Image (cartoon, coloured by chain):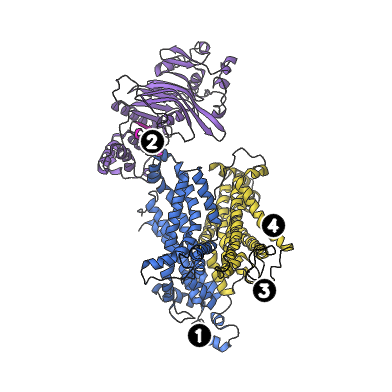
């Protein structure tokens, strides 16, 4: 294992521990007892106390925190206060929707952004560049949930091609599931793509000004070849950084978008759990989302080393 | 192409380059003419901003899109001005190659040096990956990169500046071009390395019978490496001729100033370095007459009226000055200095 | 949700004439994105101010009899499902949008700038600690913190303001520290240190004034992000609560009526987009105008 990866791994673990502490403290230690919240303000004190003991909420904070961490390590996240079923199962059920949704919208984002970014950089200051860049300026200003509503208006209300919400599941094959996630994925992707396209454009433009581009041209490579074989790989570093950061927004975005399309995903679960005061579910879901964000950014950091030979992977 | 042996390889006639800058159009190069036969070497000398590099890039067809070219550049009789980029790509790196000033940034940090040296071979000679790699190792070996076979897969950041410049030389020579343009190939290197690199280039040029255009701001480099030279100032050639002849009888006040301004080995302590007063004019607002008029010690009203014509002062030795009678009477030059 | 990186990538839609400064306003009026952005922002602020003294109809008045009216002379954009006038709701909604934005950016700006300046002035482990903390806050987008807060203290304007404010802090920390470090490396700071001035005085007298323009630009762009976040939270029901009108909430109401009155879902979203677009363009324009160095590099 290289020093580089090891150092990033230590930071990753520290961040995860910090995140778990904050989540735990905010959700469990702030005023208001979970049992009281569940039963409402006018529940009898005895009943509240009984529930408190039943849920293990009478234990000291540190013990409960360590129990949670231990549980996460072995995959036992406890039982939902409301449904009584294991939280891990509830989450797993919902991830079947949320993970494909995130992947689909990331794919759409990257495809749109790279295409637009490279096109505009290659046609710097020409009409196409100005046009596409103005579009991205508008794209950045769109709230993604409004864009989702507009898509519904167009494709479901007017054209009636796709349903306005709900999830078909994966039981009847891949296509019905993908179809029901198409509009949500597009509405998540378009706004992100507008941002990423701008990052890509300026990264490519910056690399195009480098001396080695002129060297490559002097070797007899055409503009297009230089772009593909020399420029893109160099421009990928900033683009990937932003992609990593966008993943956080994408996950946050799924919470909103799942609500727009009534999709039974992780975001919807968090949302319902807040309404139900099911704090143990909220806590684990938020932890999962935060962990995904942190891990994706860790992966991006390690990927740098594979893209850029100047970052040494094999040193010890 | 059926060219007679003594026909020029490259023939430049009245080359002009206008660049559109944010401050308006600038005539970066005016009326440059020369021709080179196979195996001949030419030096371009002048301060930075005088149009040397623009001339080189114009020959390579690598000026930015907004540059407007005039005149004619012929390679083996074929007109290169207004050649399509696709056709130019077949010449670049194949028949005309270029070595750049900054070895630190001229190589792609993401590709191995082997890939970069092999690239022109793959492109112009349709070598297979294996063939190109073998040839790349041979080339790297030839330019004096130690352990070429082992280090062919290393990345540019693992080499020193001098070694990187050897790599760019190997790259430029890969397809055995007819013409090599070296744009200040040693300026960015340590003084101790400079000589080695110049010797290497000189050896290779002779060995392969290439023509070379060497660009430098350093008169010493020019004196030792090329047969003929052109002194540029403000986008025009102010003096040109066989190197020995020019150094013996410098005709233009600018050449003389450049010569006096060079630091000298063994100069007495306390001797002040001579400088040319004033600064290089902005190409965007050049004076109408002689471009050097504002800094010239011999300036008279006539200098500002119009661009002076070229005066033949010796065999193949031309000076763009109307005051050669005075400037050359002083007999300033290497001999008298 | 939108991205904190908008800031890093904003590019001008027009190129600035790179002639040296001839008065800020004269250059500003020639800068297309600045003028357009400023006009849109003024439109939104103007609407909010206007709503304080006048609205076509009382924004809170429920009139079931005239619900879901199409646009007419009395109701320019029609009415919603409670018979409230859409134009009046949009005007009053601008108020909460701006209010949440100002307070949230205020929280992010003041604490972010303090931490950033401290990190740049103290260096060493203080800087390390602050930067690690801010990296880590990045893992919690505004919606996530708002959800946690809403789970504990309940939804509301205060919840959304706090969540958005916290989410703004790390961005301001990074920008402040980055630019402050650059100032600390300059000669005039060295001179000030040599003359015996302490870190606090140098920060106030030299560093802060020099990074002010960067902070103004960043605040403009963060304001846009705050508006997007507020809209999303109100849409989810975690932000501004009814009957207080807000654009996000209006979209939520409209979504249930998509088949009956689709236009109800168009107006509030367009209002959000106009506000955000205006702020982004204004930010880009300010960046070019306040920092000519950056403008010329492009």
Report the mark closest to the observer, 2 or 1: 2
Q: Alpha-carbon distance for marks 3 and 2?
A: 77 Å
> Which tint was used for chain B?
purple
Q: Are marks 3 and 4 on the same chain?
A: yes
Q: Secondary structure at mark 1?
A: helix
Report the mark closest to the observer, 3 or 4: 3
Q: In the depicted view, which residue is nearer to us: A238 or A152? A: A152
Q: Position of residue B23 (x, y in %)?
A: 57, 33
Mark 3 chain? C
Residue tagged 4? C46
Q: Alpha-carbon distance for marks 2 and 4?
A: 57 Å
Residue C82 appears anywhere in the view: yes
Span highlighted in magenta in the image: B88-109
> Which tint was used for chain C?
yellow
- A68 over B60 or under it: above or below: below
> Which tint was used for chain A?
blue
Residue tagged 1? A53
Q: Position of residue B48 (x, y in %)?
A: 49, 29
Q: Secondary structure at mark 2?
A: helix
Q: Secondary structure at mark 4?
A: helix
Residue tagged 2? A218
Q: Position of residue C77 (x, y in %)?
A: 64, 63
A147 vs A218, left or right, is: right
Report the mark closest to the observer, 1 or 3: 3
Q: Alpha-carbon distance for marks 1 and 3?
A: 53 Å
Q: Residues within 10 Å of mark 4 (few under 14, many from 20)?
A: some
Residue tagged 3? C65
Q: Secondary structure at mark 3?
A: helix
C160 vs A203, left or right, is: right
Q: In the depicted view, which residue is nearer to us: C241 or B315? A: C241
């Amino acid at each position: 294992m290289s020093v580089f990866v090891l150092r990033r791994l230590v930071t990753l673990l520290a961040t995860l521990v910090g995140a778990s502490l904050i989540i735990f403290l905010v959700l469990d230690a702030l005023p208001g007892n979970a049992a009281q919240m569940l039963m409402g303000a006018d529940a009898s004190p005895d009943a509240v106390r009984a529930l408190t003991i039943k849920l293990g909420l009478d234990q000291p904070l540190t013990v409960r925190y360590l129990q949670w961490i231990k549980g996460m390590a072995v995959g036992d996240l406890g039982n939902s206060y409301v449904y009584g079923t294991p939280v891990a199962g509830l989450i797993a059920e919902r991830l079947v929707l949320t993970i494909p949704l995130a992947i689909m919208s990331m794919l759409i984002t990257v495809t749109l952004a790279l295409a637009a970014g490279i096109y505009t950089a290659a046609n710097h200051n020409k009409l196409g560049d100005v046009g596409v860049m103005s579009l991205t300026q508008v794209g950045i200003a769109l709230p993604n949930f409004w864009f989702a509503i507009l898509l519904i208006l167009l494709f479901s209300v007017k054209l009636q091609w796709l349903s306005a919400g709900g999830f078909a599941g994966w039981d009847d094959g891949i296509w019905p599931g993908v179809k029901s996630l198409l509009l949500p994925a597009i509405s998540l992707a378009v706004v992100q793509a507008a941002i990423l396209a701008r990052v890509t454009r300026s990264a490519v433009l910056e690399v195009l000004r480098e001396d080695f581009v002129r060297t490559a041209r002097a070797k007899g490579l055409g503009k297009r070849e230089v772009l593909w074989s020399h420029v893109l790989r160099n421009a990928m570093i900033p683009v990937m950084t932003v992609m990593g950061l966008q993943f956080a927004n994408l996950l946050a975005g799924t919470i909103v978008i799942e609500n727009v399309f009534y999709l039974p995903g992780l975001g919807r679960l968090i949302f319902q759990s807040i309404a139900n005061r099911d704090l143990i579910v909220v806590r684990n879901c938020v932890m999962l989302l935060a962990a995904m964000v942190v891990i994706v950014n860790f992966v991006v950091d390690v990927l740098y080393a594979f893209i850029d030979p100047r970052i040494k992977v094999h040193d010890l | 192409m059926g060219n007679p042996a003594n026909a020029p390889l490259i023939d430049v006639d009245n080359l002009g380059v206008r660049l559109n800058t944010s401050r308006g159009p600038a005539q970066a190069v005016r009326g440059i003419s020369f021709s080179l036969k196979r195996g001949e070497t030419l030096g371009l000398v002048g301060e930075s901003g005088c149009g040397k590099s623009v001339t080189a890039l114009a020959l390579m067809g690598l000026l930015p899109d907004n540059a407007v070219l005039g005149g004619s550049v012929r390679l083996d009789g074929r007109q290169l001005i207004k050649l399509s980029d696709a056709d130019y790509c077949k010449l670049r790196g194949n028949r005309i190659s270029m070595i750049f000033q900054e070895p630190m940034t001229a190589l792609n940090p993401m590709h191995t040096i082997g890939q970069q040296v092999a690239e022109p071979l793959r492109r112009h000679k349709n070598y297979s990956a294996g063939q190109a790699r073998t040839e790349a190792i041979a080339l790297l070996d030839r330019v004096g990169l130690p352990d070429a076979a082992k280090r062919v897969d290393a990345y540019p950041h693992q080499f020193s500046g001098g070694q990187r410049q050897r790599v760019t030389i190997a790259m430029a020579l890969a397809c055995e071009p007819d013409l090599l343009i070296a744009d200040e190939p040693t300026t960015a290197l340590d003084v101790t390395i400079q000589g080695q690199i110049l010797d290497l280039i000189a050896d290779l040029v002779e060995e392969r019978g290439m023509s070379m255009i060497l660009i430098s701001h350093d008169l010493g480099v020019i004196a030792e490496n090329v047969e003929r030279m052109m002194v540029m100032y403000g986008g025009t050639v102010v003096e040109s001729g066989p190197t020995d002849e020019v150094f013996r009888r410098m005709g233009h006040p600018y050449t003389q100033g450049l010569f006096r301004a060079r630091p000298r080995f063994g100069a007495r302590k306390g001797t002040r370095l001579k400088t040319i007063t004033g600064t290089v004019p902005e190409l965007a607002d050049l004076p109408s007459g002689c471009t050097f008029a504002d800094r010239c010690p011999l300036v008279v009203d006539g200098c500002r009226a119009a661009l002076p014509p070229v005066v033949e002062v010796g065999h193949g030795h031309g000076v763009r000055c109307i005051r050669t009678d005075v400037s050359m009477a002083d007999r300033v030059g290497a001999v008298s200095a | 949700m939108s991205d904190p990186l908008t800031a890093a990538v904003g590019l001008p839609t027009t190129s600035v004439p790179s002639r040296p400064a001839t008065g800020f306003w004269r250059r500003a009026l020639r800068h297309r994105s600045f003028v357009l952005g400023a006009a849109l922002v003024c439109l939104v602020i103007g609407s909010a101010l206007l709503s304080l003294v006048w609205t076509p109809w009382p924004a809170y008045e429920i009139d079931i009899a005239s619900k879901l009216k199409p646009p007419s002379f009395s109701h320019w954009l029609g009415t919603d499902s409670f018979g409230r006038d859409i134009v009046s709701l949009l005007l009053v909604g601008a108020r909460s949008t701006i209010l949440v934005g100002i307070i949230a950016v205020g929280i992010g700006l003041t604490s972010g700038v303090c931490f950033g300046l401290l990190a740049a002035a103290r260096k060493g482990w203080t800087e390390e600690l602050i930067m690690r903390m801010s990296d880590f806050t990045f893992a919690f987008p505004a919606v996530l913190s708002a959800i946690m807060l809403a789970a504990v203290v309940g939804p509301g304007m205060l919840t959304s303001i706090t969540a958005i404010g916290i989410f703004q802090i790390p961005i301001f920390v990074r920008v402040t520290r980055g630019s402050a470090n650059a100032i600390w490396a300059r000669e005039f700071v060295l001179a000030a240190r040599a003359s015996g001035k302490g870190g606090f005085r140098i920060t106030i007298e030299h560093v802060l004034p020099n990074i002010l323009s960067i902070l103004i630009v960043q605040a403009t762009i963060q304001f846009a992000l705050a508006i997007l976040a507020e809209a999303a939270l109100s849409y989810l029901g975690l932000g501004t609560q009814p009957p207080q009108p807000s654009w996000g909430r209006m979209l939520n109401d409209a979504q249930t009526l998509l088949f009956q009155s689709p236009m109800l879902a168009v107006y509030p979203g367009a209002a959000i987009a106009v506000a955000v677009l205006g702020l982004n363009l204004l930010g880009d324009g300010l960046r070019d105008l306040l920092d000519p160095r950056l403008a010329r590099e492009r």
